[in-house]
Image (cartoon, grey):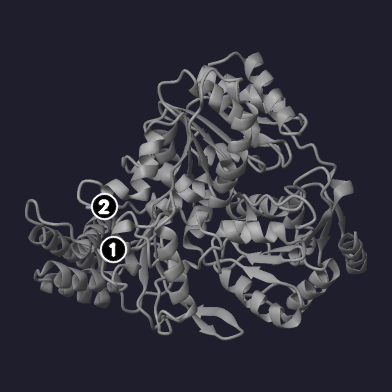
Amino acid sequence: MAEESEVIALLDVAVSTMGGQNRPGQHEMTRQVVRAMDTGEHLLVQAGTGTGKSMAYLVPALAHAIDAEKPVVISTATLALQAQIVGRDVPRLLSSLKGKLPREMDVALVKGRSNYVCQYKLGGGYPDDDEGALFSMESGTPLVGGGEGPNSALGQEVVRLRQWAERTDTGDRDDITPGVSDKAWRQVSVSAMDCLGAQKCPMASECFSELARSRAANADVVITNHAMLAVSAFEGLAVLPDFDTVIIDEAHELQDRVTSSVTRPMSVAMVQTAASAARKHCSVSVDSLNQGAKALQRALEGVPTGLMAKGLNEDQEAAINQIAEAARVVLSDSKPEANAPADGGRQMARSQVMYLVEQCTKMLEMTDEREVIWASRPGHFSPGEGYVQPDESSQPTLMVAPLSVAGKLREGLFDGRTVILTSATLAIGAAFEPVAGSLGLIGDGAPTWNGIDVGSPFDYRKQGILYVAKHLPKPGRQMSQETLSEIEDLIKASGGGALALFTSRRAAEDAAEILRARLDIPILCQGESSMKALVDQFSAEPDTCLFGTMTLWQGVDVPGNACRLVIIDKIPFPRPDDPLSSARSRDVAKHGGNGFMAVAASHAAVRLAQGSGRLIRSINDKGVVAVLDSRLATERYGTFLRASLPPLWATPDKATVISALQRLSEG
């Protein structure tokens, strides 16, 4: 590894060549990253917006990788930040350091398989139906319904996708412009579970995912995301090359992303779907599997939505065990003969049955104290009203998750590696201990670590306004007409340029639909195209608005006048009926702590700070953060939450804010 002074000199060259200037905190962060790589001590570094933290860790990563035997891995929580690093930061950095490094550096990008076009699926190697949709965890909601012919909007998107697939070099969804909807993308991609694998797929040599992983194996620096990092660390799958140094950006999201990666559903419908697929594509008897589905259906009758505090009862355990045994038999009976040709349908069916075996086993082996199980159901939906109460007449889906992932992280990620974690919101107040504890860095046998806050270069009080709409009614399950009118007034005053952040996808979609009819201002909405395409369009069109949910609360970097108004509909608390948060709160209270403040309020504080941080991205940015949740001003916990926000000039006066937005629009 180069000396600290040499790395700082490289940073100065890069920043100067790119037309920037050294920012307060950037040198200090770089020094701390270099020291961590030298000593092997884990590092938590909070770097406020504008610090230039990407350069502060990218330059040391390149310097370290020059002589290292293994690549340095850089992980982000969101695809948006991943795209920013790969598409903007790295090319500019490598160009600025050309001739300053002893050799050419290779930086590779690795994503999950569902982010790449599947050549075998394009060639008709998989069934055309949606039998596997329930199991496609990476793919989202299955496509159902009619109106999907070649002349429909969806059909036209798929045709465009197929044409693009013939000429793309990457197969990466983010590289298609304009982007396509989630529904269209699912027609040309497969999940990791349904993939045939490099050994069996007849098109493995042309597989975009395999090519990306091959490039990563020989790279100096590998850019990936937290989900891939979790799969590599906890499931032992070779989705990433071997590494011993990892830099984790957006580290405040690591706990939740890891938890999500090890949380899996189980339902009667999934058992029935797996049985149907195995019968159709493997020609085996599935009577026992269907009997298990019926047993589970009987055992779940009357189970209410929410936390199952006592775990599975005797009948439920018996049904789960019956399904596991039947699934093992189906797997054995459906094993393909040696040298059998590739069969996407068989692979899909067998992967679904294998999933049942694995999930049933986990459920039967769980312990009441360290795992959480709950019943989940979709909500009723009425046009214009959004989701209300869960439909208790529908079949529940069982969900199982660990109460804490600290132990898994300590063993699977921190042990034997140097881990550098950074975020603009890594400490709560001035304390790193809460996040360090959640990641397994506190307690008996915990590794040593260091925490530092390098600050931010922005003058927030002069650059931005925090507007808390104290006069609005306390938010309910559905968005009020008063809140919709408030959003309308703010966007009218700003003339667009608004990033509207919602706590639910339905709220974002409903608000976009209603306000498109009221405003003569373009409104984009998450899910209508790829995230990269949406953010690029929002950034390029100063009067366009972008509505979305949690993905947009972080990792979106749109400096300048294109984002002059950030609207937050609610304090982003976990849902009151969120079983995992409830269980964690109970566990904190059981050990003498304040469950609400330790779990719900801390969760909200970090995300509120992240959302507010979308506004001021450079020293010239100006604008308004509008929080439309009166509780931020009226409830006692509001003081705690406001302390996590950037120190903007605060006012509850709407007239003052409207006037400021009008001036920004005119200027």
Asked if residue 502 shows in the view, the reply is: no
The answer to whether residue 252 is left or right of residue 646 is left
Q: Quadrant of the C terminus?
A: bottom right
Q: Is residue 268 above or below residue 171?
A: below
Local crowd size for mark 1, using a 10 Å CA cut-off: few (<14), some (14–19), many (≥20): few
Task: Name the spot of residue 452 as percent of width and height, x first.
Answer: 66, 29
Q: Which picture quadrant has residue 475? A: bottom right
Q: Tag 1: residue type? A: Gly
Q: Which residue is mark 1?
A: 123
Residue 67 seen in render:
yes
Q: Residue at x 57, y 69 (%)?
A: 505
Residue beneath disc 2: 203
Nearer to the camera, 344 or 277: 344
In terms of secondary structure, where does tag 2 sit? loop
Residue 399 lies, with reference to residue 285, above or below; the image says above
Q: Name the spot of residue 188 as percent of width and height, x first.
A: 37, 64
Q: Nearer the viewer, residue 247 or 43?
A: 247
